[in-house]
Every structure is written in structure tokens, then in C-alpha cells.
Image (cartoon, helix red, strand yellow):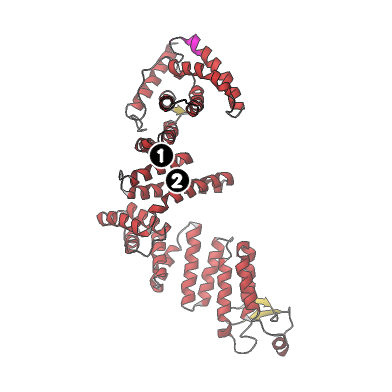
Amino acid sequence: MKAKILLVIAMMVAVTSLFAGGKSGFANLVPQKQDIPKFGKDSVKCVMNLSLYIEPYKYWKQSRYKSDIVKDAIKPWLYVFNNCPRASQNALIHGVKIMEYRIKHAKSEQEKEKLIDTLLMVYDARAKYFPTYKGRSQIGKIMGYKGVDLYKYRPDSYKEANEILRKSIDEQKDRASGSVYIYYFRTLIRMAQNGDVDPSAVVDAYDEISGYLDSNIKKYKAAGKQNKVEIYENIKGSIESMFEPFANCDDLVRIYQKKFNENPEDVELLKKITEILSKRKCIESDLYLNAVENLYKLEPTPESAYLLGKMYLKKENYDKALEYLKQATKMTETEPLFNTYMFLADIYRYKNNYQKAREMALKAAKIDPTKGQPYAFIGDLYAESAQKCGNNDLTKLDAYWAAVDKYKKAKQVEPDLAEQMNKRIAAYSKHFPSKETLFFYGIEEGSPYKVGCWINENTIARAAK
């Protein structure tokens, strides 16, 4: 018995210290209440009211919260909330639904406001008396619910809601619910529109939240949970839509140019600038160029080399682009590594080094075997080479056979390319040697044939149609 008393005292001290300025950061958001016994001053009455409210609540829940039987739960639930809130966490969770029902059916604005106050107090009580679940803090999660409901019911309290939601995200990070991200972003936009914060705060929040959402999308894709992937992609779509007014390049450059001028060697800032400008397709600006160059000087990683290579490729400085993209091949992430080899293929194509261009495209195909782009690219190389390679009516046209083979391979690997590849197949099939040409050189349709020159591919002889 003595041990139990000591345990209760220890828990009370822990909870008190948590709300008195602990790491959670919610000390100013959760009002302090005098500690009370678990079952209140009258434990018999508390247990009785717990039983009286729970039965009608269960029936109400079974009706999908449509039955009026909830009215029978209100009075006993209020007794539990006012006199023994520590008795049951479920009672506080159920209290949210009960208060939402009462708010919806309030008879006056004055009554509605009082009920909203009570709803917010329910969240505070749960955070105070049940700060952890299975050994892990749940205050951030509970305050996330509170912040969302505060803004939903009192949109003019957007600054207060923003503060609560900000601290919820600080604690939850990528574990926050989608509604917390969305409502936090809404409150921040209101603040930016009303001059309460600089628009750069919206850009920073977009960058942060996008990171959390991308993390979840990647995690659930790896786990094969497509329904979860779709949920987070929809949330991201909502955030993107809200961010659009703040996403034009002129504003982004204006916002981040000032930050860059103040801290041109801040690696984290440089990463943020390059990422946000790249994501919003604002890479034509001098700011992007300067940020990428500084980032590479300070942290010469394959990733920063990749950014520089893309930038110089865009500016058609192929020698510089080649220099940096070669270094970028040390990356490990599939998508940018695939892009790097395709960029290198483009550069070698520009330099008329078709063999090297094909080599890079085939490396890209190995990086991501689901992509048909490398084969379409090689097909284009073959088609471009046709007239350069041959010296007679047959060898000036045989490369088109090899080109069409690659287009067929591209749509086989990636069916979404079918329409595009079919157009190329139809166009280049017209350039096949004629039946007369095949006959003249002693070649039968459908017979094996090896295309020479640098192509050096085995194919099948076909006549133009």
C-alpha cells in the first residue's frame, strides 16, 4: 500500500513538472488545475456516473452518432468531467464527441461560445491527466486536436491556434495528423496576409511540412500501403494549393535573397534555397546559381554537384555540366542518379559521341528498370545516325530497324510511353529499305541482320510500308 502511495505521488510530481516548463513546450497552453483524487471526492458517485453515461454513449456510437440517445449521456458525463476527470481517459475522448454534438445544437451564440470553452477544456484535461500513452508523450497529439478545433470553431483566434499547432508539430514532426499540417498552414497564411508574420514564414513552413509529408509517402510506398500513400498525397495537394499564391519565383527570390545576403555560407540555408527554388522551377535566377555554387564550395557532395550540373546544362555550358555530373554519379538515390545518367547521355549526344551517349543511357536503364526513356533515347540516336553511317541505299536505312526495336522496347518497359513510341515507330517505319532494295542486296524480309557502324546491333530485316 505504501509503495502504491509513493508511486502516485511520483506520478503527480512528474506530471506537475511536465507542465511547469518541461521539454514538451506546452506549459503555457495547458491550464493548471488542482490535483484531485482519481475518482474524485465521492468515488461511488463517480463510478455510478461513469456507468450512466457510457451505456447511452455506446448506443449513440453504434448509430454513427445520429441517435438522440446521446442526451441521456450528457448529464452523467458532465459530472465525471467536473468531479473526477482522472477516472477514465476514454471519458475525455468521448467528451470531445459529446461537446461537438452540443455545440452543433446550441440554441444561441452565447451558449455555443461556452460550449466551445468546455470542449477546449476537455483537451486540456486529457493532456494534464493523461500526458503519456504506452510510455510515450501524447501531449503534442492532443494539442494538435485542440488547435484544429479552436480554428474550426473560432477562426478569428488563428494566432492562438497557430501557437498550439506549431508546438504540436514540433513534438510530433512527421507523426502529426494531416489535419494538423493543413490547419497550421491555414493559420500561418492568415497571419502572413494580416501582416503578423513575414511571408518567408509561409515558405519555410511549406518546406518543412513538405518534408514530413514526403517522408510518410516514401515510408508507406515502401510498405506497400497505397491507401496511406493516397491520403498523404492528398494532404500534400491541399498544402500545395494553399501555397500557390506564395510560390511565384519573384517573391521566393525576394524572400530568400535577403537571407542569402545575410548568411551566404549557412549550409542549411543554402540547402533550403536550392531545394525550394528547384521545386518551384525558379532555377533561372542568379540567387539559385549563387546558392548552388556556395553550397558546393562549402559541402562538395555528389548532391551539390548534381545541382550544379543541372544548372550548367540548363545554361548550355556542356563542359561545365559534364564536369559536375560525373561527380554526381556517386549519388545513391535512384531518381536523381537516373536523371544524372540521362543528363550525361544528352551531353554526349550534343558532342556527337553517340557510343558514350548510349553507354550512359544503358546505365540509367540499369538504375531504374521501370523507365522506358533510356531506350527511346537510344532509338533516337540510331535514327539520327542512319544517314551518317551508311554508304549505299541499304546501309543508309538499316539503322531505322534498330531504332524501331528500341522504341518497341521502351513501350514494353513503360506502357505509358506507348502512344508516343507508336508515333515514332510509324514515322521511322516509312524509312525502312524498300522491297526492291532488299531484293537487290539479296536480303529476305524477316531474316536476321546486323546493323554496322557504331550501332553494331542484331535486328530483323523489314521492308517499308
Give the quadrant of the N terminus. top left
x 58%, y 19%: residue: 55
Looking at this view, is 227 or 401 the one in front? 227
Q: Is residue 249 magenta?
A: no
Q: Secondary structure at mark 2?
A: helix
Circle on res. 212: 2
In the picture of the structure, the residue carrying the numbered disc 1 is 169
Q: Residue furthest left?
A: 262
For residue 362, which numbered disc appears in the image? none
Q: How far apart are the alpha carbons under marks 1 and 2?
A: 10 Å
What's the amino acid at mark 1? Ile
| Left or right: where 260 falls relative to 417 | left
Q: Main structural element of the magenta stretch: helix, strand or loop?
A: helix
Residue under the point 47% across and 74% down = 348
Does the CB distance between marks 1 and 2 fall below 8 Å?
A: yes
Amino acid at circle 2: Tyr
> Which span is picked out in magenta?
41-46
Seen from the viewer's position, the closer of residues 46 and 308 is: 46
Res 147 quadrant in image: top left
